[in-house]
Every structure is written in structure tokens, then in C-alpha cells.
Amino acid sequence: MTITVVGIGYGSDTTAAVAEAIGAADVLIGHPVFLAAVDHLVRPGAECFDVLDQATPQEDVFAVRTRVAAERSAAGAQVVIVSGGDPGLLGMAGPALSNLERTGRADEIRAMRVLPGLSAWQYASAALGSPFNSGLAVLSLCLYGHTEEKITRQIAGVAASGLGIVGYMVRHNGEDHPELFPTDEPPAEISRRRFTLLRDELLKSRDPQTPAFLLTGLGGADGHQLATVPLKSALDLWEQAGPESIVCVPAEEYQQSSGLIWATT
């Protein structure tokens, strides 16, 4: 049988292909928030669940989801792994493929399908105007497992590029789940340091008055929350950020008018 990894956007902004895959599934595995968002698409009798309670520092939730999906698929079920946003950007597609490879499940890799969904940066772009029209770079600032050397190198390169920037994972996932993401120092200190580094690297080549945006609750039924400050004061955004917030800085050549911002090409 086939394992299908889908992205549902946020809220219920699913593509037709994703909706069809969800409607045909026997088993759906994913975060409860994402499963609830597509409950209206699930056929009667299908199983919907997550496996967070089975995760450990040795086998994270992504690995457990992949293992359970492979086991249920091998037993004959049509399995869908549900990601918010797009499954290929901080979603389940990469971890699923990696864990299938690690456990020697080549047949499941060959049969696996990945169906895209809207990503948070796309919602943010539409909400702000078109700040990434000339290109963008996406960073996961506090992804568990990022070394300081790696994230420092990435931030420096992206900041110098002049591209629009979207920062995911502004806060470290160890802040909410220290039992699953243990760190040698308080995770809030890690996220604050990395956010400060992003600000300081950007200030080397950007006007201090360049707008920086924090968006929270993208795609939600009640709308999103938006905070805006000059780049020089960007640390104020970190103070307001939650686990689902993203930070956006437009490309270096941008225009603003009537509450919207766009990049020029």
C-alpha cells in the first residue's frame, strides 16, 4: 500500500489532490490541530490519531509517525501522514523519507507520495503585500539539532544576500517540550541569541529603519496577529513570538504604500 504525506496549509486551505487523498485514507496520522482542521474531509470509519505520547529523545515524534505509518501500510491500510503548511518545508516529507531509509524500508520509499500545501511564508507574503517578489530565503532559526556553527553560517549568508527573509521556529521547541528536546542551556536563551544574531547580521547591510514583521496565527479562522517594528528594534518581536510565529524582512529593494509592502525586481 501507499504512504501519502500531505500538506494542508493552515485552517482548511487544502488542494483538491490533498482533499482526495484524505478522503480515501484508512488511517490518518498527524498533530491533533491539523487533523481537526481536515476532519470534514475524513471518511466515516477512518482512524485519526497522533503518536506524540510515544515519542522519546531517542525516537522523536517524526520517527514514530513514520514507523507507525509503515506498519499500518504493510498491514494493508491506505495511510496519510498530515502536515500543516507544506510537507516539504519543516514538514513530514523529509523526516518520513529519512526514517524509511534508515529502517531499510525501500519499498515504502518507492511507493510514497508527497502532495504539497501552502506554506506559512506564502500566507505571510499575501498578508503583507508581496515582500518576497524578488526572491526569498527561509531559515529555521531554532530547529532542534542545529549547531551554533551551522545556524551562524546560514544566517550570515542569507543576511548578506539581499533576499527577503522568513524565519521559522523563532522560539526553540525545547521551551514547550524540554523532555523531548533537551538542551545544555535554557532553550529561551538559545532562541534569543539566534534572533539577535539575525538582527545584527541584517543590520550590516540593511537600513536600520527597514520594517520587520512578526505574524502569528496565519490561516486561522479569527485572522492573524501582526506586529511591525524597525529592524533595529527587532528584538521586540522576539519578546512577542510564540511557537507558531514567523518573522519576515522584505528584500533589500522594497516599496511601501497604504499599509502594504512589496519587493521590486
Image (spheres, rainbow, N blue to C red):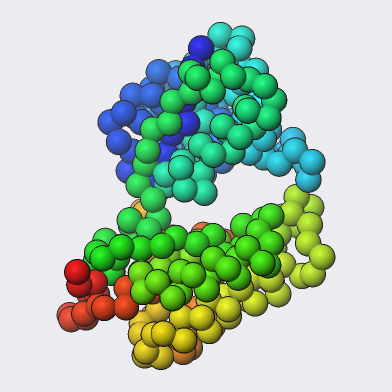
Q: As displayed, is residue 62 above or below residue 200?
A: above
Residue located at (68% from left, 30% from top): 102
Residue located at (79% from left, 57% from top): 182
Residue located at (55% from left, 36% from top): 30
Q: Nearer the viewer, residue 25 or 155?
A: 155
Picture coordinates of residue 253, whole percent (x, y): 26, 78
Picture coordinates of residue 98, whole percent (x, y): 61, 34
Picture coordinates of residue 233, whole percent (x, y): 48, 88
Q: As displayed, is residue 247 above or below residue 38?
A: below
Q: Nearer the viewer, residue 20 or 255?
A: 255
Q: Nearer the viewer, residue 220 or 5?
A: 5
Q: Quadrant of residue 120?
A: bottom left
Q: As displayed, is residue 211 above or below residue 137?
A: below
The single residue placed furthest to the right in the displayed view is 184
Q: Is residue 67 visible?
A: yes
Q: As displayed, is residue 264 above or below residue 12?
A: below
Apparent side of residue 58 relative to residue 207 in the rendered image (left or right):
right
Residue located at (41% from left, 68% from top): 165
Apparent side of residue 249 relative to residue 204 in the rendered image (left or right):
left
Picture coordinates of residue 246, whole percent (x, y): 46, 65
The single residue placed furthest to the top in the displayed view is 76
Q: Quadrant of residue 47?
A: top right
